[in-house]
Image (tube, rainbow, N blue to C red):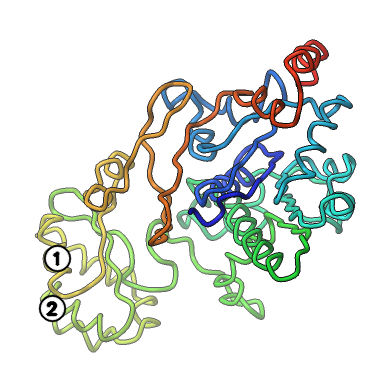
Amino acid sequence: MRPLEGMLVVTLEHAIAAPFCTRQLADLGARVIKVERPGEGDFARAYDSRTHGLASHFVWCNRSKESLTLDLKHPEGRAILQKLLERADVLVQNLAPGAAARMGLDHARLAAVNPRIVVCGISGYGDGGPYTEKKAYDLLIQSESGFVSITGTPEQPCKAGLSIADIAAGMYAYSSILAALLERGRTGQGRQIEISMLEAMAEWMGYPLYYTIDGQPPPVRAGAAHASIYPYGPFTCGDGKQVVLAVQHDREWATFCEKVLQRPDLVQPYLGNAKRLAEREQLRVVIEQVCATLTAAQLVERLDAAQIANGQLNEIADLWQHPQLAARGRWTQIDSPAGPLPALYPPHHLQGSEPPPMGPVPALGAHTEAILAELGYADADVARLRAAKAI
């Protein structure tokens, strides 16, 4: 069996944070029913059309789910949702602030009829405080958390190229739900979980927070290089390719100088990371002079021989063809409304368990009739609900 096989997750979700969370639950075998607005659905469906006509974010975060369309402003739509929640193990939502509570979807009210349910709400800023009602999207939270201020070049702050605030919140929601299900196994009781995107990012900002304690200057924006360890970043080789290398401590520094740069005279003058960091511009010139005499392959060969950590500065196209992913069989196919699509298996490896389901990306409302039939609705009822625009 898969770890969450037999679990029913109902989700009122859009964008990235909650869908990313619930896709992880689906990967572990949970049945995930995604409740969407009729005719429109999760607005992430319309972010782009780059994946054979489908939205790239939506494909990434929504495989192995069932799509049920309900108008939750319609009394019969809410009644259908209530029937589902009476049998659900988990409810996940990232609706607008206060919307779930106004619909009676807080744990206190749901537990009255389903005491085992785990209810997880994801919001930008959490309940309480002056920011409770503020709308929150990924870039806004990257900015509010201070992340953008330490990312980029000395001249220009930058956001991350990924929705990391959404991903952080989604992963804390996922792990918290798993913890709540473990606890429920002992107590028989569900729990309310609250995840704030700002608090998730604030946790990830722990290093720069402590680095600047008592008003000390923040880490410099260092582009693709590490802000407080040197040398740790990309260097350009003679063939124009870039290799990222990482020297973490003085023993590696000595090895790097002797075996890679072949400049043992540099060891003593630059002992101590603080010294190397203070002299990073001078050191960069020396290191790049050596790199310019080597191809990327030759530099990697020297670094590997010296056991100095390194990696290629790959483009996205390189990731599709990465030899390690291919060698470990990490690619498979999933179905979608646009036909078969390549997909990566999730990174967890649970030996002895069934592999992840890797189910299709659902078309909007694809499972509505089947789910309603499970709940006891006859064909005539479904037709009536469609005519009333409740589904």
Q: Which residue is mark 1?
A: 290
Residue 251, image quadrant = bottom left
The residue positioned 10% from the left and 60% from the top of the image is 298
Does residue 245 appear left or right of residue 257 in this picture?
Answer: right
Callout 1: helix, strand or loop? helix
Q: Position of residue 24 (x, y in %)?
A: 54, 50
**Quadrant containing the C terminus in the rendered view:** top right
Is residue 211 placed above or below 65 in the rendered structure?
below
Does residue 151 appear left or right of residue 116 in this picture?
Answer: left
The amino acid type of the residue labelled 2 equals: Arg
Few, some or many C-alpha atoms within 10 Å of disc 1 (few <14, some 14-19, many ≥20)? Answer: some
The residue positioned 85% from the left and 54% from the top of the image is 111
Q: Nearer the viewer, residue 70 or 206?
A: 70
Residue 297, image quadrant = bottom left
Q: Outermost residue toward the bottom?
A: 268
Does residue 214 appear left or right of residue 26 in this picture?
Answer: right
First in sequence: mark 2 vs mark 1: 2
Residue 305, image quadrant = bottom left
Callout 2: helix, strand or loop? loop
Q: How far apart are the two marked residues, 2 and 1, measured between alpha carbons?
A: 9 Å
Is residue 37 placed above or below 260 in the rendered structure?
above
The residue positioned 28% from the left and 50% from the top of the image is 325
Q: How many marks?
A: 2
The amino acid type of the residue labelled 1 equals: Val
Q: Position of residue 250 (x, y in %)?
A: 29, 85
Few, some or many C-alpha atoms within 10 Å of disc 2 (few <14, some 14-19, many ≥20)? Answer: some
Q: Dots 2 and 1: beta carbons under 8 Å?
A: yes
Q: Nearer the viewer, residue 91 or 343?
A: 91
Q: Which residue is mark 2?
A: 263
Q: Position of residue 372 (x, y in %)?
A: 72, 27
Q: Position of residue 255 (x, y in %)?
A: 18, 81
